[in-house]
Amino acid sequence: MDVSQYLEIFIDETKEHLQSLNEQLLVLEKEPENEGTINEIFRAAHSLKGMAGTMGYKRMQRLTHDMENVFSEIRAGKMKVKAELVDVLFRGLDALENYLDNIMNSADEGTDDNEEIIHELNRILKASLGEVAEEPAKEEPKKAEIAAEIVKEFKLEEHENRAIAKIYEEGGIAYAITVYIQESCILKAARAFLVFKALEELGDVIKSNPDVQDIEDEKFDFDFSIVLLSKEKETKIREAILSVSEIKEACIKKIEALEIPAEMPAETKKEDEVEEKKEQAVKQTPAKQAAAKTAQAGKPVVNRSVRVDIEKLDDLMNLVSELIIAKNGLVSMNQTDTAKTDNRSGFNEQIEYLERITTNLHQSVMKVRMVPIESVVNRFPRMIRDLSKKLNKKMELYMSGEDTELDRTVIDEIGDPLMHLLRNAADHGLESNEERIALKKPETGSIFLNAYQEGNNVVIEVKDDGAGINVEKVKRKAVERGTITEEQAEAMSEKEAIDLLFTPSFSTAAVISDVSGRGVGLDVVKTKIETLGGSIETKTVLGEGSSFIIRLPLTLAIIQALMVELGEEKYAIPLGSIETIESVSMDEIKFVQSKEVIHLRGNVIPLVRLDEMLDVEKKEDTGSDLTVVIVKKGDKLAGLVVDNLIGQLEIVIKSIGKYINNSKMISGATILGDGEIALILDVNALV
């Protein structure tokens, strides 16, 4: 049986169960008597054990089995939940996550048995029960009445007899084995696969009855037979088979070696070698087939699936059917109106109908790609719990808006920046317990993670009620490092000083801890968010706390853009970044520190001459007025000077890869209706 086809399902399901266990254990730590939580944890551990067993991940199965045992006793009221047990269970969860990481990277769970965690679980279990728990007695396998008949089920080929003779020469034994599966078993093929996998660790399976394909397709009753060549004892082989769940019994008999001629004619030998190779190619065992497919893939198993509500798929299906109707309408119009040129109104109606469908189709596909931000943030309560213990600070994480949806590609990338901001808040944002009491603040610090939709953007806010950012300290540190001069520091606004935190390797921490240093890595956070087309800004009040506000686009695939002309070239500016479009006369342009600015409704806005920045050949001077597109990044404004406005267009973003080096100004490209390519400007980088 090829388990690689179930690997993605296994990974998805395991992630869900591990997240459920994490959440429920956090609840259990605060409410040790909560029966609903105890039952939920037992169910999740039980499901994980069964899944790991079916996939053949024995180490993972063993660890979840021991965790399940503990909760079985808690459910029965024989033991209580204590802090020591919760800590060990969290360590067990971390070990299971490591197994999952290994499986995602190589389809193999690794070699770590986590004996220490298993020992601790069993020690706590036995101590709570007040006795050494006995192993349940295994049901004695029934006597095999048909043991003598097993060999008759096989018609051994010449090369198979030769292989049997060879194992005896090497001091091994050939076994004929019939395995009986319990009649209540639902996944017969899965159990057979696990038996093959267990036996292949002890020797070579050279034949099976029925053959491998029939076993994989479940075309057999509740028993199957195999020939195993091994140097292990019969008892060890029996143990390996019976260690697989839902196996009723195993009948094992030694096969005697046949007399094989010492020498064969060269031609016969050659023919036999060819036949043997054919047999080995065709009759690979299921476990080897699966391993071969995994090795052939040779790349990590990345979770690339999205769970979609059936109603969203129904909408998508309806729109596609309407698209086909619209296409048929245009085709028929083309056939009937080839000779006529006066029927433009009907053609325009069809085009409008098509445009309406494609817009709806785009929105529908966007909804399908959307994933709740919950899938990223639900691991953070556990992280804050661990940091609280590590830093010896009392803290609580409050989350809201977990159901806010973001494009799947954004979701995959936003986890690390958020984690970094939360660790900063815990380590350097919040004061120590003693300091908070002295300042008459609540001893338990609060960290807030809020997400909400705002227009075409999703806003994620990470806030703490800690000490806030000491702006003077930031300036002093920047002067010490030579980033700015004393004069610049004095002239700097609070906002500009806070922006220094986002320069590479900047930190105000006296000692850089292994948890974080405020500023260490904030440049990486900023870079990551800006590559996603987003922005980050910081607000702080000394003594009251800080707030990091991230704005991200809902989707990265299709956007509304303003098309503009520079010289002979066309460029796209994302509509979400545009504030207004102004016509500015040349005498309105002023100079501040040798830079061009305009004064607009109380704001001083710097001008960006795009033709100079992008090295575009200028058009001849067409007059005294400039067309300026006012764009915004956070609370900063800038005016992009363009030659001409084309209009608003819905564009599909295409990656330009490594073709253009100044990628900071260009965020991608799009193909226009006439086949021409237009580059998309990165407003964040330009501002």
Image: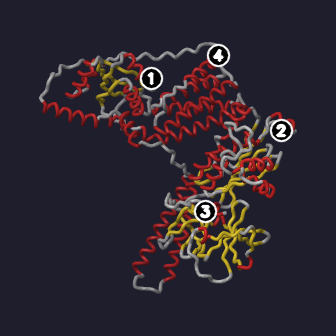
Distance from disc 1 to disc 2, alpha carbons, whole Å, reads 55 Å
Give the Cα distance between marks 2 and 4: 38 Å
User: What residue is rendered at 62% in x and 28% in y?
Assistant: 89
* Earlier sequence position, callout 3 versus callout 1: 1
Q: Which mark is residue 127?
A: 4
Q: Which residue is mark 3?
A: 682
Q: Between label 1 and label 2, give the one nearer the viewer.
A: 2
> Residue 243 bears which disc, if any?
1
Looking at the picture, how far across and down is residue 508, in whole percent?
74, 44
Q: Residue at x 38, y 33 (%)?
A: 287
Query: Of the residues under marks 1 and 2, which one precedes in the sequence?
Result: 1
**The quadrant where residue 467 appears:** top right
Amino acid type, mark 1: Ser
Q: Residues within 10 Å of mark 2 (few under 14, many from 20)?
A: few
Vertically, is 530 above or below 244? below
Type of amino acid at the residue the image marks with label 2: Pro
Secondary structure type for disc 4:
helix
Q: Nearer the viewer, residue 645 or 314?
A: 645
**Left or right of 56, for residue 210:** left
Sequence order check: which comes first, mark 2 or mark 4? 4
